[in-house]
Image: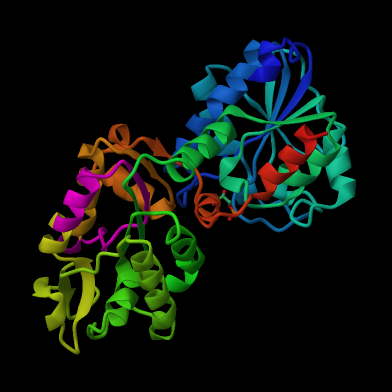
Amino acid sequence: ADLVAQGQVAGQRVFIRADLNVPLDDAGRITEDTRIRASVPCIELALQAGAAVMVTSHLGRPTEGAFKPEDSLAPVAARLSELLGREVKLVANWVDGVDVAPGQVVLLENCRVNVGEKKNTPELAQKMAALCDIYVNDAFGTAHRAEGTTYGIAEYAKVACAGPLLAAEIDAITQALANPKRPLIAIVAGSKVSTKLTILQSLSSKVDGLIVGGGIANTFLLAAGLKIGKSLAEPDLVGEATAVIEAMKARGAEVPIPVDVVCAKTFAADAPATVKAASEVADDDLILDIGPKTAAILADKLQAAGTIVWNGPVGVFEFDAFAHGTETIARAIAASDAFSIAGGGDTLAAIAKYGIEQDVGYISTGGGAFLEVLEGKTLPAFEILAKRAAG
Ligand code: 3PG
């Protein structure tokens, strides 16, 4: 946006790395197009400024050098054409040269089929850099990958900068974590502590409340000395969970442990659901949601929050009998005056299920990238752009 304001984009060849990695059904139709819609402003900005615009993205995890029809960005090109209101031509085999005129936009076929993309070889990166005058990274969802189009090209391009989506994402997360309106409450849920342990550890030094849910909460229930029956948990990580609870306590912060839970005997949508006190879980019980008392306690905390960071549904919300906890959390976030930020595939599915998109302060397009920022990591895409900006 700064380059556009400075009039440096007109007539220039602009290479935009977007994250257009959207879910497709078996017939190859796009089932969810948020990432494509989120990428439109950057493309429009470049077009309106009179640039010759090349856009690329990965789709899935194809084998390099072995393009298959299902790897094609063709459905994305069609959707992008609709959104931009103009034809977006899809270009195959583009590494050695792209034919595009100022005021035009083309989509470069799945960048992950190019040999050297994943390993980020200098050969590929230099060739891609030679295609453009300005490289723009607007792919927040892929910012945690140091690949040819997210890292290498930025090293060699004449000019390398962040696009509006990439900038907005990092601003929103920084606003939520670096200088938050307090109390700052994070909800970290999901099946395993092991996949989110570094996030829990990193957040435990920043947040005022850390709400755990799903299988993660079960491991915390074990840490609190409670029985969880047959529920999913990682008993070998109880020590780590205890350390997180202790670290929070030492700062005067808290990890609210569920006081009641919703149990079933089998993992099924039609399994009879029973609400139990957390202290009364039987040996053959599976905990599939937080109970109504816990949900109400957490909702009150969220109402009073200044900032909320949300990653992960607190129960098996795909099954209606075990969705109450996640729905209550979602509605409490929607009703709260707090600045809220949410990210991750399951979280976005819950937001869509309860129709609260308009009431969440910021919805991230990142899955793994969002989690890595919460872990406190500097993502490769930002690292290289900062290095280029520093000269
Ligand atoms: C995602 O869907 O999280 C991003 O597009 C990154 O995809 P990847 O995990 O295949 O790199």
> Where the N terminus falls, by quadrant?
top right
Q: Is residue 219 visible?
A: yes
In magenta, the rendered stretch is 297-322
Q: Is residue 361 above or below residue 218?
A: above
The residue lying at 63 percent from left, 56 percent from top is 61
71 lies above or below 271: above
The residue positioned 88% from the left and 41% from the top of the image is 126
Q: Is residue 12 above or below residue 292?
A: above
Q: Can you give x and y, in whole percent of width and height, for residue 340 in the image? A: 35, 40
Residue closest to the eye, 211 or 88 = 211
Front one among 102 and 195: 195
Look at the picture and state if 170 lies above or below 101: below
Magenta residue check for 311: yes
Q: Quadrant of residue 163?
A: top right
Q: Quadrant of residue 226?
A: bottom left
The picture places residue 380, in percent across and down from the top left corner, at 69, 49
Residue 382 drawn at (x, y percent):
67, 42
Q: Quadrant of the C terminus?
A: top right
In the displayed structure, does residue 322 sit left or right of residue 371? left
Q: Residue furthest bottom?
A: 283
Give the residue drawn at x 72%, y 16%: 51
Q: For residue 328, say whether it is visible.
A: no
Position in image of residue 47 (x %, y %): 65, 15
Q: Quadrant of residue 372?
A: bottom right
Which residue is depicted at the point 33% across and 67% down?
249
